Amino acid sequence: MIRKKILILAGLSAGLLMLSGCEMLGESKWTPQEPSAISIDKKGVITEYVKDTLDQSYYDVTELQSMITSQVDDYNGTHGEDTITVEKFETTENGEVSLEMKYASAEDYEEFNNTEFYYGSMINAQLEGYLFDVNYKRVKDGVVEGSSVSGSEVIKEMAQQVLIVRAPLEVHVPGNVLYTSTNAEVLSSDVVNATGEQDEDEGATIVLPSSAVYKTEESSFAEQTAANRVYIIFEME
């Protein structure tokens, strides 16, 4: 929820959840089914919508907007003007807040939100330390086909693109989804709900950490990170 966005931007206390939203890609409008969502275009530009209802007795909307603007300005001051832009900040009388932000790249989204986020080729993802060592759903035209397949089968698609995110997050990709890790729900040919939750028949699967940087952390943290890591392999349109 937006409370995690506040945490990221203002250093408030833990226990808060970030939510995000949708964008227009090309001529087709995408409306997210989940409150937490992002959309990424062919150039890697990310649009995020954050929606939540604030506890007005605890948060001041004007102060929140000021904090967000300040943090964006600070980031752009060291990364370049308009690297991140606040496209919209709207509130209602009952405390509902809608925030739309745009990021120039996946790296900017990852750094600004202090989260794991990778977008690029599968080959470069391997060079970054991702081993693809989980089970996957095979997808055709937005429909899951057959039983799960192993990472050794998926890495044969090295020419394809991959988006690696931390759950929960609904994701709109600029192409056709070919595979997702089993801890995600396929909503359409280009939309995946990265839930971080395994299907019932995958519940006993042990998911190993894929990135070397996370292997240096304590075991419990590494296991949680791996469980919440979602792989989305797709063919660019």
Image: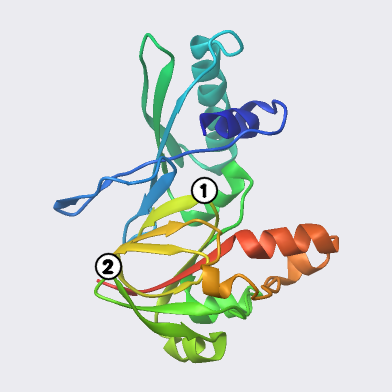
Q: Is residue 73 something one can see in this rendering?
A: yes
Residue sitting at 41 percent across and 20 percent down?
A: 96
Q: Looking at the rendered structure, which numbered label has been put on residue 189?
A: 2
Residue sitting at 63 percent across and 73 percent down?
A: 128
Taking depth in this image into account, of 67 and 32 the one nearest to the observer is 32
Q: Is residue 46 something one can see in this rendering?
A: no
Taking depth in this image into account, of 57 and 45 the one nearest to the observer is 57
Q: In which quarter of the image is residue 16?
A: top right
Taking depth in this image into account, of 55 and 215 the one nearest to the observer is 55
N-terminal of the two: label 2 or label 1? 1
Q: In terms of secondary structure, where does tag 1 sit?
A: helix
Q: In terms of secondary structure, where does tag 2 sit?
A: loop
- Position of 232 with respect to 187 (left or right) is right
Q: In which quarter of the image is residue 74?
A: top right
Give the distance between the C-alpha atoms of the residues marked 2 and 1, in whole angstroms. 24 Å
Q: In this view, does 181 lie above or below 148?
A: above
Q: Label 1 amino acid?
A: Tyr
Of the 4 image quadrants, the one containing the C terminus is bottom left
Q: Looking at the rendered structure, which numbered label has been put on residue 109?
A: 1
Q: Are marks 2 and 1 in contact (CB under 8 Å)?
A: no
Q: Label 2 amino acid?
A: Ser
Q: Looking at the rendered structure, which numbered label has been put on residue 203?
A: none
